[in-house]
Image: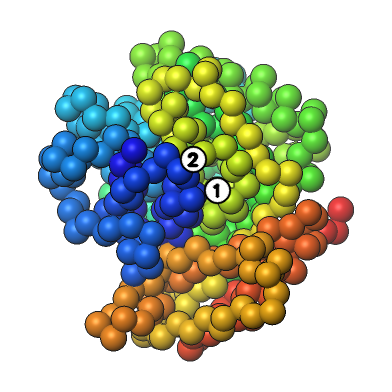
Amino acid sequence: MNVLVIGSGGREYSIGMALKKDENVDKLYFAPGNGATDELGENLSISDFSELADFCEENSVDLTIVGPEAPLVDGIVDLFEERGLTIFGPSAQAAQLEGSKIFMKNFLARHNVPTAKYIETDSLEDAYKFIMTLEAPIVVKADGLCGGKGVIIAQSHDEAKKAAGEMLSGNSFGDAGTSIVVEEFLDGYELSVFAICDGEDYVVLPAAQDHKRLLNNDQGPNTGGMGAYAPTPLVNDEIYRKLDERVIVPTLEGMKAEGMPFKGVLFIGVMVVNGEPIILEYNVRFGDPECEELMPLLKSPASELFYKAATGDLKNATIEFHDKYAVGVVMASKDYPYKNSAPAEIIVDEIVHDEIFKEHAHISYAGVSREEDGKLYATGGRVLVCVGLGDTIAEAQQRAYMLVGQVHYAGKQCRTDIAYQALNE
Ligand code: AMP
Ligand code: GLY
């Protein structure tokens, strides 16, 4: 089959890698892709949804997989389906689970899914009143999509009030902050759980753990994610069971009952507090960098998983995973996440004399461009992810960091402790 992947990050590169090694896949396209996806398939410079649908019709594309949330929220799935095209992702209506924190919070309340105590409001006075009922730290969030940066964890009541004021006045996040959510701080460990859904049935992927903060030991500012690993031993059968019963089933049943059956990846951001999974948020797409570790763990053909989910046929799929661990270390540019850095040439040393390492480590490229000289340059905030696979987390981590040592560009930065929570267990 011919497959189109929408997006340009390391997430889409890793989906592309999984499709590339799948015998059922003939042609692979990316829109827009990045400077390295052109090694896996063909990059298209089309962004208009109707023109993408035209391309799919004209080039017999059998399946489109949407990576990022923005096209989902903007209705790409609705448009493709109206035109009879097969596409993996939720409708615009269902994508509100990520697109609007207020929609998500109200949905969780309607369906009794455990989440932090909160209010949504556009009134500064109400926000102040609620802030005074909580103990610090206090979480203040803008309602709309702000690329993961719309969350402030205030260390005092005054700081929380200031954040609420700035968001509501439109100073910090523009229109995304005209309504806010104020919520209690959850103190526990964070997980990323993904369910691939077809509207009726679902498959839960091995649970992953991301590292959101820039610096070792979870210090420094929040980022899009500096590394992840899966499966995490922090999840036992009991937690999987609670997630299933209290979160996934009520969510999917609720979406169906409300007339917007969920199809695509449901990304459940979970905080485990004293053994109880509590929902931080939903996203309607794969996590990045979690996807870069989950794709190589997939044993079944990637096209089968995505096609069957897109066509409501997951009950006829047996999805298997390798009995291995994956650790992914994000290498970012010099000034990430504060500002863009000057383009820097990337040089990767060839791996020689070690076939096992070669087979168990690879790079997923993200913020890169290929210049006219044919070379790859680091151009984005998060440049690439070094992924190691192993029979233990320690082995996978060691391979990921060996690969980090092979990669060179000016100003490279990465955390050196990815997967530490699992290794300290
Ligand atoms: P969100 O955009 O809602 O995912 O929030 C981004 C990050 O902020 C999360 O991944 C958490 O690390 C942190 N966070 C959000 N809400 C809370 C909360 N209620 N308690 C503790 N940490 C939170
Ligand atoms: N890694 C977290 C995210 O993609 O939102």
Does the residue tagged 2 have its C-beta within 8 Å of any atom of ligand 2?
Answer: no
- From this viewpoint, which residue is outermost toward the right? 425
Residue 161 location, x and y as percent?
50, 53
- How far, Cα to Cα, is label 2 from label 1? 8 Å
- In the image: residue 128, left or right of residue 166: right
From this viewpoint, is residue 255 visible?
A: no
Give the labeled residue for mark 2. Answer: 302
Q: What's the residue type where badge 2 is placed?
A: Ala
Q: What is the image's colouring?
A: rainbow
**SS assignment at label 1:** helix
Mark earlier in primary sequence (2, 1):
1
The one of 358 and 80 positioned closer to us in this rendering: 358
> Residue, x 58% and y 51% (percent of image)?
296
Q: What's the residue type where badge 1 is placed?
A: Met
Residue 175 location, x and y as percent?
28, 49
- In the image: residue 74, left or right of residue 266: left
Total number of numbered discs in the rendering: 2
Rendered view: 342 above or below 47: below
> Residue, x 80% and y 62% (percent of image)?
394
Quarter where residue 78 is shown: top left
Q: Tell me, for residue 295, which label it has, or none.
A: 1
Q: Which corner quadrant holds the N terminus?
A: top left
| Nearer mark to the viewer, of 2 and 1 | 2
Neighbor class of circle 1 (other Cα within 10 Å; few <14, some 14-19, many 20+) is many
Asked if the residue at tag 1 contacts the one at tag 2, i.e. Cβ–Cβ closer than 8 Å, the answer is yes
